Image (cartoon, helix red, strand yellow):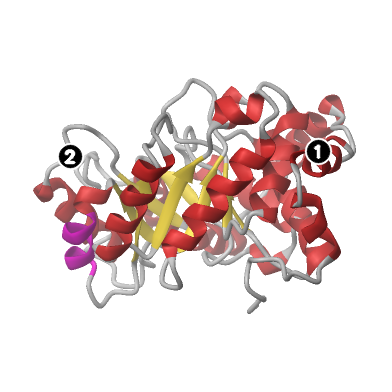
């Protein structure tokens, strides 16, 4: 589904809530409190849904098409990024019916290499920016980071919010930073806003961060960097899916969701797809609106896909070790 721009128009009633720190704080703290027991119970209940045969095959292919295949290590080399790009374009070289992944995700200095590796395939190049993963840098440095990645050809920017500012209640500072990064993305790159949910401490904070990111123009809201102990969980992803659903109901603007970190198996991925379908709805069951931030998930999806096709699991050399 094609939706309007992710920016609120000046005439929209919600635009007024960002006019000052006090109005923004009042709005965010006026959001309904999260029933943690209810949230976790619903996430657990949806995770018990049984998906079999044809539906499972469809879900696995859909999950493959939603993977942001990621390498974010200090030891990344051009050769590793090229290999990652090749795998994104043709995840299973023995089966051309296997979908491509949605994107490859790399540091800004590797964007040009990744762009060349996936050229002509439709696979996007995403780049983490804004002093990822800690976000501890002046705004001028963060914006330079974004502009460099976009200039090198990044189709998507994954930014981290200033968690210190958010947790100390300086919501307008976080809002202004997101809007500045969104502007630096220009018209060519979509913006994913990473909250690092494991550092936000409470579900209420995750709900507030979700609405703050969307008000500021995020194209996606993303759980985590994958660099802390607690990353994507069914509960925090369910909460963010509720937020994007409710935001679209109020504004007409659709925003994507990206759980990242800790999703390693096909079984886990399918549980998340059930959450999407049952919470936000079928409109989000597309890689334009839902992604998995992962490095090892793709291997398990490929092995499960082969199992469905042949009736047996592949040997250990069937997939590459990332």
Please provide percent x and percent y for residue 90: 26, 64
Q: Residue at x 29, y 59 (%)?
A: 88
Judging depth in this view, the residue of 237 and 111 nearest the camera is 111
Residue projecting furthest to the front: 20
What residue is drawn where x is 70% and y is 35%? 206
Q: Nearer the viewer, residue 193 or 165?
A: 165
**Secondary element type, mark 2:** loop
Q: Is residue 48 visible?
A: no
Q: Position of residue 293 (x, y in %)?
A: 45, 46
Lateral position of residue 322 relative to residue 300, left or right? left
Whether residue 301 is visible to the viewer of this picture, yes or no, is yes
Q: Mark 2 or mark 1: which is in front?
A: 1
Depth check: give the residue in front, 122 or 166: 166
Look at 17% across and 39% down and name the residue there.
76
Image-based side of 78 in relation to 30, left or right: left
Q: Which residue is mark 2?
A: 76
Reading the image, the residue beneath label 1 is 22
């Amino acid at each position: 589904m094609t939706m309007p721009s992710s920016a609120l128009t000046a005439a929209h009633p919600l635009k007024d809530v960002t006019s000052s720190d006090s109005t923004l704080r009042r709005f965010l703290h006026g959001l309904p409190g999260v029933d943690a027991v209810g949230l976790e119970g619903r996430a657990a209940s949806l995770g018990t849904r049984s998906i079999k045969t044809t539906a499972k095959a469809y879900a696995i292919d859909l999950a493959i098409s939603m993977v942001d295949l990621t390498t974010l290590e200090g030891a990344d080399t051009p050769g590793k990024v090229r290999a990652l790009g090749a795998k994104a374009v043709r995840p299973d070289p023995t089966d051309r019916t296997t979908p491509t992944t949605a994107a490859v995700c790399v540091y800004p200095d590797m964007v040009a290499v990744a762009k060349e590796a996936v050229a002509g395939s439709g696979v996007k190049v995403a780049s983490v920016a804004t002093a990822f993963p800690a976000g501890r840098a002046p705004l001028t440095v963060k914006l330079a980071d974004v502009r460099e990645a976009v200039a090198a050809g990044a189709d998507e920017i994954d930014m981290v919010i200033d968690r210190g500012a958010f947790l100390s209640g300086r919501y307008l500072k976080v809002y202004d930073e997101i809007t500045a990064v969104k502007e630096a993305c220009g018209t060519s790159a979509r913006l994913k806003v990473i909250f690092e949910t494991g550092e936000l401490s409470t579900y209420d904070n995750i709900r507030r961060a979700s609405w703050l990111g969307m008000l500021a123009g995020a194209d996606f809201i993303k759980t985590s960097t994958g660099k802390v102990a607690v990353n994507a969980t069914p509960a925090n992803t369910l909460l963010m899916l509720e937020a994007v659903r409710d935001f679209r109901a109020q504004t007409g603007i659709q925003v994507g969701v990206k759980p990242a970190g800790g999703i390693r198996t096909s079984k886990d991925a399918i549980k998340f797809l059930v959450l999407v379908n049952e919470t936000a709805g079928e409109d989000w069951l597309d890689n334009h609106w839902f992604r998995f931030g992962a490095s090892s998930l793709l291997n398990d999806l490929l092995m499960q896909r082969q199992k469905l096709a042949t009736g047996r699991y592949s040997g250990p050399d069937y997939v590459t070790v990332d």
